Structures are given as C-alpha cells and as structure tokens.
Amino acid sequence: QVQVVASGGGLVQAGGSLRLSCAASGRTFTSYAMGWFRQAPGKEREFVAAINWSGGVTYYTDAAKGRFTISTGNAKNTVYLEMNGLKPEDTGVYYCAAVKGAPSRRAYDYDYWGQGIQVTVSS
C-alpha cells in the first residue's frame, strides 16, 4: 500500500509560477514511479509529467516541455512539479499518482492516486 498526498496549487495570473508537491509513504513506495495528471472542466484526465525516484527518467507532455519541471526533492519521499509560464489552459485539478516500476504516461497504469488539487490560471 502506498499513500500519496499532494499539496500546493492555487490561483495565479497568466505567466506566473506555482510549485506542486507530492509526498509518498508506505513500505514499498520506492518501488513506484510518480506522475502528475490534470483534468480540466469537461475534459478527460491527461498526463502532465512523470519521474522515477532516482530522477534519471522523466517524461513530459508536449504542453509541459520547457515550462514545467518534475523533480525529486531533498526529502526522499517527495516529488515536485515546478510550473512556470502558466497559461489559462493549464487550469484544472492536478493529481499525483504512483505506478509500480517505471514511469508511465498512461493513467490506467497508476495504482495509487492522491487527492486532486486545484490550479487556476487567470488571464
């Protein structure tokens, strides 16, 4: 069993920055890679970024490349999503999740999900 707790988010103007955090716990959480997804109103959940705990493997959706950075922090159980140059289309509920083994872009691969956190980017 892995517990995943996301934090951060909020309201920011277009062009601004936010950092989301995701803390994982449980005896076997290091066997899992971590990913971020988001869901905009009226749309399906979509992949944003993923990483393994060593930080050696990272994936991004095209919309996130160059603006978002996923990383593992000094706290060994925390993954961060640094979001810069935010756009109104980045608005949505962001979810952190854990997948057994390697990082994945597919939501259905993920086994454990944290609560969603709202990110709102105003124009």
Image (cartoon, rainbow, N blue to C red):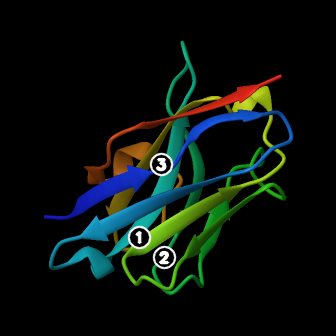
Q: Residues within 10 Å of mark 3 (few under 14, many from 20)?
A: few
Q: Give the quarter of the figure containing the N terminus.
A: bottom left
Work out whether mark 3 precedes mark 2 in sequence or the reverse, and give the earlier one: 2
Q: Amino acid at mark 3?
A: Arg
Q: What numbered label is drawn on residue 52? A: 2
Could you tell me which residue is drawn at 52 percent across and 79 percent down? 73
Q: Is 18 drawn above or below residue 71 in the view shown?
A: above
Q: Is residue 102 visible?
A: no
Q: Amino acid at mark 1?
A: Ala
User: Disc 1 vs disc 2: Cβ atoms closer than 8 Å?
Assistant: yes
User: Disc 3 vs disc 1: Cβ atoms closer than 8 Å?
Assistant: no
Depth check: give the residue in front, 113 or 120.
120
Q: Amino acid at mark 2?
A: Asn
Q: Is 43 drawn above or below residue 112 in the view shown?
A: above
Q: What numbered label is drawn on residue 106? A: 3
Q: Residues within 10 Å of mark 2 (few under 14, many from 20)?
A: many
In the picture of the structure, the residue carrying the numbered disc 1 is 33
